[in-house]
Image (cartoon, rainbow, N blue to C red):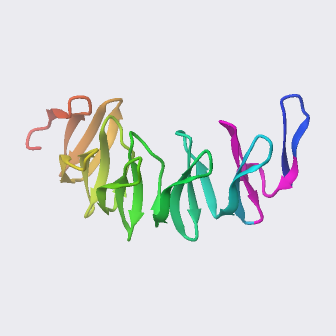
Amino acid sequence: KIGFINRYGNEVIGLQFDGSDEDVVQFNDGTAVVRKGEKYGVIDKTGSEIKAFDYKRIYPLQDERFLAKKKGKFGFFNKDGIDVIPFEFTDALGFSEGRAPILVNENWGFIDDAGQVVIEPVYQEVSDFRQGAAIVVRTDFSCLIDKSGELLVPCGMDAIVPAYDELLRIEKEDKMAYFDLRTKKFIWKAAGF
């Protein structure tokens, strides 16, 4: 069993949770993710439940929200345990720049902070947003989109990979180019790109 001690070594929450150290997310902003049996929940520093032990998995996010899986679907709740985005997605990832990837019927799209689909799920793969752009894959080709889903670099690229801070290296048919995320423009293209 797992419990919690304070910095002086005094027990503050008794040994009542299951799993190993990998199953427990240490306290952050006054909450911790813990497991009882096969289900996860969230507790506060006194050991009181903030979110009941009804979840297959819970992931704390950096914005005082949690991503969780319940009854085979993913959704989000806040640090007070209130569901803020319904549990309706096949899979989901954390937010970056106000957008979170969601999986619906085998395709990825993005929702905003309110849970509204802002980029339709039509992609095979997606990355986090970085400086207002995300790398996505559609029909096995890479492209670059902005936060509204508009194409910055058309689909048809063999690869788009981060090169250095604000730069992306883009490859197409053995040719290469560099794209600047700050200006949203190509800064160099090989002949014939």
| Residue 7 counted in the magenta span | no
Q: Quadrant of residue 191?
A: top left
The furthest residue to the right: 10
Q: Which residue does the image show at 20% across and 29% down from the upper left?
A: 183
Instruction: Write down the region rendered in magenta.
Output: 14-37
Q: Position of residue 128 (x, y in %)?
A: 39, 45
40 and 157: which one is in front? 40
Let me know if residue 25 is in the magenta part. yes
Residue found 70% across the figure and 59% down from its top: 52
In the rendered image, residue 172, in percent from the top left (x then y), is placed at 19, 49
Q: Residue at the spot x=73%, y=66% of the render?
A: 38
State which quarter of the image contains the C terminus.
top left
120 vs 48, left or right, is: left
* Residue 114, position as x, y percentages in the image: 41, 50
142 to the left or right of 80? left
- Say whether residue 152 is left or right of residue 101: left
Whether residue 174 can be seen here: no
Viewer can see residue 8: yes
Residue 134 lies in what quarter of the image?
top left
Residue 118 screen position, x and y as percent? 30, 53
